[in-house]
Image (cartoon, helix red, strand yellow):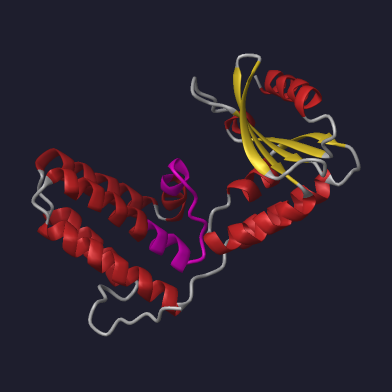
Amino acid sequence: MRDSIKRIAQQFIVSHYPESDIVLVGGSAVYGNLTTESDIDLIIIDETETPRIECYHFLGWKIEAFIYTALSLEFEFHTARYTGMPTIIKMCAEGLLIEDKHGNGKELQREAKILYEQGPQVWDEDTINKTRYQITDFLSDFKSSEDFGESLFILTKLINTLTELILRADGNWIGEGKWVARNLKSYDEDMCDKLAKYTKAYMNTNDKTELISFIQSTLDNYGGELFVGYKEFFL
């Protein structure tokens, strides 16, 4: 399957981005866990193009093209370390190099691997406190909500913010979608399993007790709930 994906990607590049300097195949195609919904993710370095993401159908496959110039990719790397979202860095570090006109592809991958291993910028105390305040607010709303639909949306935001605190406060990548769960599981499998367990119990019984207790005890590891005394200055 990997060889066939490589051939399709190469044909796509010849057809759509013949001036590209570096092309990498990333995502599920590299890791060998393709599903019926998988697409082919491509990192394309092309100085003749405007940086963007563009999606295609090609030879029966969905193709997601992340198009950069060398300068815009460097900016993306710096942004990723600030936001904690390593998608492009990870794809560059672990991707399959299929085009390298000027011989710079290996160096790009080496740089991406170093950045990925370094992790994102560690949160400072102000950022941790701001997130504790946000979680406290969401938790208060969740406790008092009697509407299941509203509670579901509050809980989604609460879990996402709590997970971000857990990972970023300790200098770990956060990711998006399924990668949030995978990164949390990689960092602390027991915590990830308990979060899933208590959330599932709430969904089945509408009893919030265990889930609220778990969230509070987890938040205690980072200073606990924060409301009185919190302040944030506006620009």
165 left or right, relative to 107 = left
87 left or right, relative to 142 = right
Residue 213 in magenta?
Answer: no
204 left or right, relative to 226 = left
> Who is closer to the viewer here, 29 or 87?
87
Residue depicted at x 63% and y 39%: 53
Residue depicted at x 75% and y 20%: 7
Q: Height in image: 168 above or below 29?
A: below
Quadrant hosting residue 131: bottom left
Q: Height in image: 226 above or below 39?
A: below
Q: Residue furthest bottom?
A: 229
Residue depicted at x 10% and y 59%: 144
For the image, the number of numbered tags is 0
Residue range highlighted in magenta: 163-181
Residue 189 x/y as whole percent? 39, 50
Residue 205 x/y as whole percent? 10, 41
Residue 24 x/y as whole percent? 73, 37
Residue 160 x/y as whole percent? 35, 54
Quadrant for the N terminus, please.
top right
Residue depicted at x 28% and y 45%: 196
Quadrant hosting residue 49: top right
Residue 176 in magenta?
Answer: yes
